[in-house]
Amino acid sequence: MSDRYTAYPALSLERPADGILKITFNKPESFNSVDAEAQPS
């Protein structure tokens, strides 16, 4: 995976096929809620 996604530690990113980016929230301790860590400015 490219370094362009390293700013998003709360997300798990996979490329299962060409042209597809699978994004999974990976913060079970906060029930996968979106916070400032998932949305860096």
Image: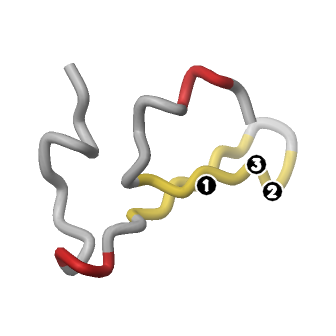
> As drawn, which residue projects farthest toward the right?
18
Query: Within the image, what quadrant is residue 21 found in?
Result: top right
Crowding at label 3, few (<14), some or many (≥20) Cα neighbours within 10 Å? Answer: few
Mark 3 = which residue? 15
Badge 1 amino acid: Lys
Q: Residue at x 17, y 66 (%)?
A: 33
- Asked which secondary structure carries label 3, the reply is strand
Q: Could you tell me if the residues under marks 2 and 3 are in contact, i.e. CB atoms within 8 Å?
A: yes
Q: Residue at x 37, y 54 (%)?
A: 10
> Where residue 9 sits: x, y (%)?
43, 47
Query: Within the image, what quadrant is residue 38 found in?
Result: top left
> Where residue 16 sits: x, y (%)?
80, 56
Q: Is residue 4 left or right of residue 16?
A: left
Q: State the separation of the CA atoms marked 1 and 2.
A: 7 Å
- Asked which secondary structure carries label 1, the reply is strand
Mark 2 = which residue? 16
Crowding at label 1, few (<14), some or many (≥20) Cα neighbours within 10 Å? Answer: few
Answer above or below: position of 36 versus 33. above
Q: Residue at x 18, y 55 (%)?
A: 34
Badge 2 amino acid: Pro
Label ID, residue 34: none
Answer above or below: position of 19 versus 38. above
Query: Within the image, what quadrant is residue 32 found in?
Result: bottom left
Q: Is residue 29 left or right of residue 23?
A: left
Answer above or below: position of 10 versus 33. above
> Looking at the image, which is closer to me, 29 or 13?
29
Badge 3 amino acid: Arg
Q: Could you tell me if the residues under marks 1 and 2 are in contact, i.e. CB atoms within 8 Å?
A: yes
- Asked which secondary structure carries label 2, the reply is strand
Mark 1 = which residue? 22
